[in-house]
Amino acid sequence: MLTLAALLAVIPAGPQSVAVRELFREACLEGKLTLNADRGKIVPRNDIPDSLRWMTISNSTTSRFTLIRMKEPPSTYVFIRNYDPDKSGFARTDCSVASRVITFEDAAQQFYEGTPDARPEPSTYGGIEWWEIDVPKQGYAKQLYKAGYNFTVLRTNVYGAPSSKQ
């Protein structure tokens, strides 16, 4: 298995890769995605590639689930899930950006942004390799996935109020 540190070689990102990072920041970190017809559109669950359908599965009741197929950057999808509040601390908001045009190295740099000292270990499930950084004291977790058909996924889960557990 590859370590993220080995994948973080200094490789200049192309403009589409940079655009995906900006989209992730806008949609998932700032929560301020501006959507218009030139940029993308909301689509039903059956209008996404089969290799990303696992992202639409949930073991919890959700209050709202939104899928967006972006025109720019191309081959890129945004998944936003808002959960009904519960007492167990389950993620209140989940936001992901899946793209074929972001380099894995650039996605890994975005993944580490804000938590440079984290040391996530890779895991594998169903042929998908992924890493997680969980920071409950700050109220969020984030994941990086190498999914099928050359999709790379950046995800953040916001728990709501920060936890006193670590």
Image (cartoon, grey):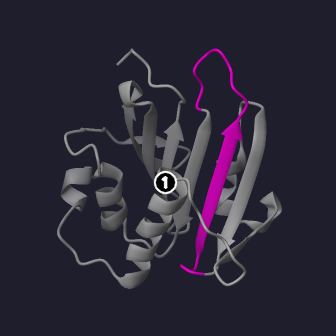
For the question of whether residue 1 can be seen, the reply is: no
Whole-percent x and y of residue 124? 45, 42
Query: Which quadrant of the structure image shows residue 15?
Result: bottom left
Whole-percent x and y of residue 140? 45, 35
Q: How many marks?
A: 1
Whole-percent x and y of residue 148? 55, 61
How many other residues sit within 10 Å of disc 1, few (<14), some (14-19) or many (≥20)?
Answer: few
Whole-percent x and y of residue 74? 57, 80
Nearest the viewer among 111 and 39 is 39
Is residue 88 inside the magenta stretch? yes
Nearest the viewer among 146 and 44 is 44
Is residue 89 inside the magenta stretch? yes
In the rendered image, the vertical position of residue 115 relative to residue 113, given as above or below: above
Query: Which quadrant of the structure image shows residue 66?
Result: bottom right
Give me the residue at 30% from left, 77% from top.
13
Q: Main secondary structure of the magenta part?
A: loop
Give me the residue at 52% from left, 50% from top.
127
Give me the residue at 24% from left, 38% from top.
119
Give me the residue at 24% from left, 60% from top.
7
123 lies left or right of 116? right
Residue on which the image places disc 1: 30
Q: Secondary structure at mark 1?
A: loop
For the question of whether residue 45 can be seen, the reply is: yes
Q: Which residues are magenta?
A: 72-91
89 lies left or right of 63? left
121 lies left or right of 96? left
User: Identity of the amino acid at label 1?
Assistant: Glu
- Quadrant showing the C terminus: top left
